[in-house]
Image: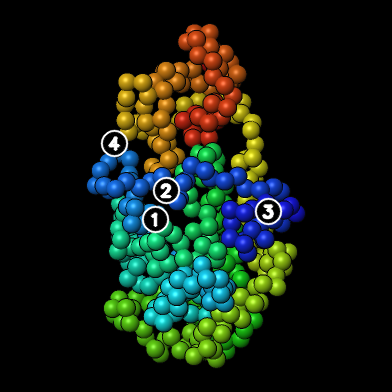
Amino acid sequence: MFSNATSTLPPLYARWMEHVLSDRIPDETDATCADCAMCSADITQRSGSELFYNPETKCCTFTPTLPNFLVGRILRDDDALCAQGRRSVEARLGAGLAVTPLGVGPPLTFRSLYAATSTEAFGRSKTLRCPHYLEEGGGRCGIWKHRESVCTTFYCKHVRGAVGSKFWKSLQRLLLATEQSLAQWCVYELDVGVEALGFLFSSNPSCTPDHQPNGLALDGKVDRRLYDMAWGTWSGREQEFYREAARLVDGLEWPDILAIGGTELRICERLVRDAYSRLMSKDLPPFLERGRMSVSQMGHASWRVTTYSATDPLSCPRSLISALPYFDGRSTVESMSLIEQREGIRLSAGLVRKLADFEILIPGEGRPKD
Ligand code: SF4
Ligand code: SF4
């Protein structure tokens, strides 16, 4: 345990992760959300193959699936700063689309559009903008204190490049597995009735409330019969159910959650710890060779290159690009020394680590080269 170790996380998730991680998570300072690092006033503009996001959406072209206990936390949060976010959640509950004891999912219309439009629309289409997005102050999240696993772990840029990206992806997997398992546990503990359980946990996923590809859902209308079947004994008391779910989860510490989530959570936890130790390590791989990269801009003095993510390109001096062939599988120390002897360029360990973090250089197999 440590104090304020994971302050970049929502308070509930920070409390849990203090049991998983040995120290704090470094801030992703390159993702400057208040002054969005991906935004351009003219989103039709491109620089080479680089994408820009719409300042009216940022990366919030997404409707999150809120597990029941987070819905309850939002509903009972009387912090004035959360009032608009709370109203946006109440509006989703009032609409009734994909609203079940498990939580609140994205409506079918959003899911269909999101699946059909992919990366070209992400960060760009106002039609896909999150219902919890607040325009004021340059674009804020109305439910920031209680955001779910995807919104907790998404960053367009990572200080440690692919190493950071892998850590956040592993954490997202752990938090998502936790959300799903606790949402199910709450449904069981709060006893929705056996018919509702059979409906919610049908062996045919196309019949669950989140997956109702019927004409009513496409028109943004609720099938009341299916809705009531899902809510069982709690039908008509949905907000009370969500608040109870929040109360139940409040009482859990991380060991309790591991006991509920079982082996899947333990596997995810182990993977997060491994990714975290890589994130915190300053070691250089003993052997390095060139990775794959695409060049989006070729300037006289530097090139703009993209490796692990289209949203996180790097500018590299031309002289550094020219030196990369020295990393040909021989030892990293030998490559650095050859570059200094033959090219007169002294590379610091920090710079070589950055090239490795961004996968401009990737671990080699240590074959000696002529
Ligand atoms: S994470 Fe999203 S809001 Fe933050 S800088 Fe990146 S695109 Fe902008
Ligand atoms: S919940 Fe918040 S962070 Fe997530 S997409 Fe919506 S506005 Fe953005």
Query: Mark 4 vs mark 2: which is more N-terminal?
Result: 2
Q: What's the image's color scheme?
A: rainbow
Q: What residue is pinned by disc 1?
A: 138
| Mark 4 and mark 2: Cα distance apart in space | 22 Å
The answer to whether the residue labelled 2 contacts the one labelled 1, judged by CB atoms less than 8 Å apart, is yes
Q: Residue at x 41, y 58 (%)?
A: 137
Q: What residue is pinned by disc 3?
A: 4
Residue 116: x and y in percent read: 30, 60
Q: What residue is pinned by disc 2?
A: 35
| Mark 2 and mark 3: Cα distance apart in space | 25 Å
From the image, state whether disc 4 or disc 1 is nearer to you.
1
Query: Mark 4 vs mark 1: which is more N-terminal?
Result: 4
Q: What residue is pinned by disc 4?
A: 48
Query: Mark 4 vs mark 3: which is more N-terminal?
Result: 3
Q: Is residue 128 left or right of residue 163?
A: left
Give neighbour class at mark 1: few <14, some 14-19, many 20+ (Cα, 10 Å). Answer: some
Q: Is residue 354 above or below residue 195?
A: above
Find numbered disc 2 in the image and state the secondary structure of the residue it sits on.
Answer: helix
Query: Mark 1 vs mark 3: which is more N-terminal?
Result: 3
| Mark 4 and mark 1: Cα distance apart in space | 27 Å
